Amino acid sequence: MTCRLEWQGWDKINASKYADSSIMIMVDELLEMGASRGRLRAKMAGGAQMFSFISSDTLNIGKRNSDAARATLRGENIPLLAEDVGGIRGRTVTFNPANGVYRIQKGNEISSI
């Protein structure tokens, strides 16, 4: 199966740098590995405004990425089960596919969704 982005002339390495196209790449690769599209679910974290001196929504890349991810998931008909987005602190995330736990660390604060 050829990735939809390759059909559109994108290369996967550069396309994986963006929220919307990286979701499409991931969906294509999961389907290639035998995943059932109807069983796909999503959780997401991120979208912080890392540069608090920027007040323009246009320059708020974190919000734009979160919005793009939500729109792409809707377009792929993948339910978004939970999210932890926005704010001004970066996150480190880990995902355990065995139990579906998505662990989020913001500084010393740790939570799961």
Image (cartoon, rainbow, N blue to C red):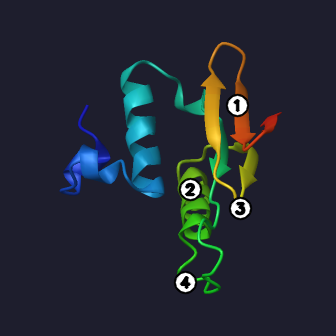
At a point 69% along the width and 56% down the height, the residue shown is 89
Which class describes the residues within 10 Å of circle 2: few (<14), some (14-19), or many (20+)?
A: many
30 lies left or right of 1 = right
Total marks in image: 4
Residue at 74% x, 63% y: name it.
Answer: 87
Mark 4 crowdedness (10 Å alpha carbons): few <14, some 14-19, many ≥20: few
Between 17 and 28, the one nearer to me in the picture: 17
The answer for how far apart the CA atoms under marks 4 and 2 are is: 16 Å
The quarter of the picture where residue 39 lies is: top right
Circles 1 and 2: CB atoms closer than 8 Å: no
Determine which residue is flagged by label 4. Answer: 58
Amino acid type assigned to the residue bearing label 3 in the image = Gly
Residue topped by disc 3: 86
Going by the numbered disc 1, the residue's amino acid type is Tyr
Q: Which amino acid does label 2 sit on?
A: Ala
In this rendered view, identify the residue nearer to me: 23 or 74.
23
